[in-house]
Amino acid sequence: MNEERHDALRSLLGAWSLGACPPRESAELERHLRGCAECTEEAARLRDAAGWLSLDEPLDQPGSLRQQVLDWCLARRPAELPVPAWGMPYTAETAKLDALLRDLGPEEWQEVAELPWHSGAELLRPAEVLGRLTAVDGFLALALGLPDPVPAAAPSAPARAPVVERRVPPQEAAVPVPRVPRVPPQGGPSTAVTAVTARTARLLADQAGLPPQSVRARWRQQTHDLVRSAALAPQGSTPVDLGFAVLPLRDAFVDRALECFVHGEDVARAVAYPYDPPAPQHLRQMVELVVRLLPRALAGLRAARPEPAGAPGTAGAPGTAGTAGATAVREPRRLRLVVDGPAAGEWLVPLDGEQAGPPGGEPVASMVLDGLELCQLAAAHRDPDRLPVGEHGDRAAVREVLHALPLLSRPRAL
C-alpha cells in the first residue's frame, strides 16, 4: 500500500470511531487495521474518546469544574477587575441558574415550580421565578446607581390594582399562599412587605407578554451589571435597602446568592434537572450571614409572639427590669450553634439581644445541624418542627432559634 492510500485510510479513523464511516470504506479500513499497528493504536484511542460522547452518559459537568477552570485561568492571567470574595457566591449561583435555564425547552418553561414558604407554597413558572429574583436584585441595582428593572408605579394606586390582577399570569390567582404562616411575619403587617410585593407584581405584569428567553436575557444582563459594579466597590460598605432590612452591599450580595440558589433548586426540581449545592466556600459565607442575622430574627419572633412578663428575652429578660421593683439577675443567654457538612463551624449566638448586655457564662443550649439545611430553613423552605437537629440543654431556646430562622426569608404576599 502506498503512502498516499495509507494517509487516506488513516483520515477515516475519526468517522469510523463514531460509527459514521460508509460500509464500504469501513470494511476497507478494518482490513487495513489488521496489518497496521500505528493505525490500530490510534483507532483504539479514538474509540475510547468516542465512548465519552455516548448519550447514555450524563454530559453535565461537576459543579466544582467551573471554579477550577476560573482558578486556573486567573493563575495564568489575573483579572483586570477582580470580583471581591463576597461577590463570588452570587456570581457562581447566577451562572449555575443561567446554565439550567439555557437548557430549558418550550415545554419546560411552562412547568410550574413549587416554592415552599412557611406552611404553604407558591406555584410559579420559571420565568416568574426570574421576575421575583430580578425585582429584589433591583434593590442592589438602585444602591449601585444602576437602572431599576421594575417599572414605576402608576400615579393612581387604586386604579392600578385591578389592572395588575388581570395582567399577572393566571397562576397568580391560583397560588395557595397561606394566610396564616407557620412562622408569623416580623411585627405583623408591614409597609415593607407591601412595597416588596408591589414591586414584584409590577415587574411580573410588565414581563407577562414576553417570551421566556427574553425574561432570562433581562435577568442575565442585570446579574452581569451587578457583578461588574460590585468589582468597582470592593469594600462592600454601600448600604442596600432591601425593603425589609438594610444590609451592607457585601451582605446583600450573599443574601441574593442564597435566594438564587434556593429558587434555582426549586426550578430544577420542577423540570427534573440535577442541581448542585453551593461550593463549600460560598456556602460558608451564606451560613455566616445567617448566623449574623439570627439575633434580628429572634427579635422579630418575639415582636410577633410576645412572651409573658418574666420570660427570657422579654420584659423580665436577663439584665432588664421585670415586674415593678424587681430586676432580673441572670446573665444574658447564648446558644452554641454547631454546623456540620462542607460549611462546618461553631458559633455562639446571643439569645437576648444586644441591649441585654454582653453574654456570659456557659451556653444554655447547643444545637447541631447541616449547613445547607440551616440555609434552607432561613429561606423558609424547611419546617422547623420537622428538621433533624441535634440538641442539648434548654430545649425551649433551641425551639425558639429554629422558629426564628425562617423570618429571615424574603417577605411575600401574605
Image (spheres, grey):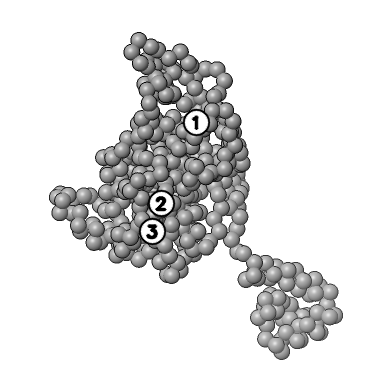
Q: Does residue 282 lie above or below 28 as drawn?
A: above
The residue under label 3 is 124
Label 1 – label 2 distance at C-alpha: 25 Å
Crowding at mark 3 (Cα within 10 Å: few <14, some 14-19, many 20+): many
Q: Nearer the viewer, residue 98 or 16?
A: 98
Q: Is residue 313 visible?
A: yes
Sequence-earlier tag: 1 or 2: 2
Secondary structure, mark 3, is strand
Crowding at mark 2 (Cα within 10 Å: few <14, some 14-19, many 20+): some
Q: Does residue 324 lie above or below 102 as drawn?
A: above
Where residue 234 sits, quadrant-wise, is top left
On screen, residue 216 versus residue 7, left or right, reads left
The residue mark sitting in front, 3 or 1, is 1
The residue under label 1 is 396
Label 3 – label 1 distance at C-alpha: 36 Å
Q: Amino acid at mark 2?
A: Gly
Where residue 206 sits, quadrant-wise, is bottom left
Residue 67: percent from left, percent from top:
57, 48
On screen, residue 146 versus residue 73, left or right, reads left
Q: Is residue 130 visible?
A: no
Sequence-earlier tag: 3 or 1: 3
Q: Amino acid at mark 1?
A: Ala
Secondary structure, mark 1, is helix
Label number found at residue 120:
2
Which residue lies at the image location 30% right of the left edge and 43% below the top edge? 193
Q: Amino acid at mark 3?
A: Leu
Which residue lies at the image location 18% right of the left edge and 54% below the top edge? 160
Label 2 – label 3 distance at C-alpha: 13 Å
Which residue lies at the image location 53% right of the left edge and 61% below the top edge? 273
